[in-house]
Image (tube, rainbow, N blue to C red):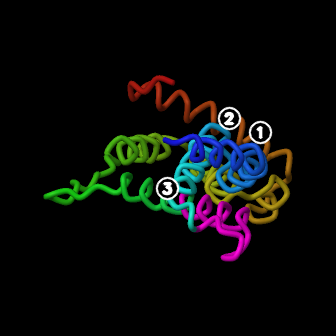
Amino acid sequence: MTDADEELVRALHDEHAGALWSYVVSLTGDRVSAHDVVQETLLRAWRHPEALDPARGSTRGWLFTVARHLVVDEARSARSRRETVAAEPPERSVVDESEQVLQQWVVAQALTRLSPEHRAVLRECYFRGRSVAEASRVLGVPPGTVKSRTHYALMNLRLALQEMGVSR
């Protein structure tokens, strides 16, 4: 590197590096990689001094364009590095729903041990999501009865599940 080359790089750095770095940070959001992009941009300017000729246009504009291209190229190459080609497609994962099916079956069996009134109140309040007032209208019983039946139905359901060997 000759003295003239060093002087060119130093002058470019002193005049444009701060603005160039701020611009690259705004593009990438990464202060560390912005330093690398600025360094590479100034290196390219040193390699192509003809591009810095004022007759060809703004030096700062050329530097910003080079920096933007470097950022875009890096983003594209990063995306391609994340994509991998495999000889075989990955195996499909199979969700094992056996535990859930078993729990549903156990609860259904425990519900058969309840009285029809208790099953009806649980069906309306828990399975159909009705409020106490709505369940009261559907079942034709007072709201207080819905509340007490719900309490005793849950207590009996818990007992039936315990008798079946299910613990919390």
Whether residue 47 is in magenta: the answer is: no
| Residue 60 percent location from the top left of the image | 73, 62
Query: What residue is drawn where x is 79% and y is 43%?
Result: 147
Q: Secondary structure at mark 2?
A: helix
Q: Among all residues in the image, which is located at the extreme bottom?
A: 56
Q: Amino acid at mark 2?
A: Tyr
**What residue is shown with label 3?**
47
Whether residue 61 is in magenta: the answer is: yes
Q: Amino acid at mark 3?
A: Arg
Q: CA distance from mark 1 to mark 2?
A: 6 Å
| Residue 126 percent location from the top left of the image | 65, 51
**From the viewer's perspective, is residue 90 above or below residue 148?**
below
Query: What residue is drawn where x is 42% and y is 57%?
Result: 77
| Residue 160 percent location from the top left of the image | 48, 31
Q: Amino acid at mark 1?
A: Ser
Is 32 positioned to the left or the right of 162 in the image? Answer: right
**What residue is shown with label 1?**
148
Snapshot quadrant of residue 13 = top right
Q: Which mark is residue 152?
A: 2
40, 89: nearer the viewer? 40
Q: CA distance from mark 3 to mark 2?
A: 86 Å
Q: Secondary structure at mark 1?
A: helix
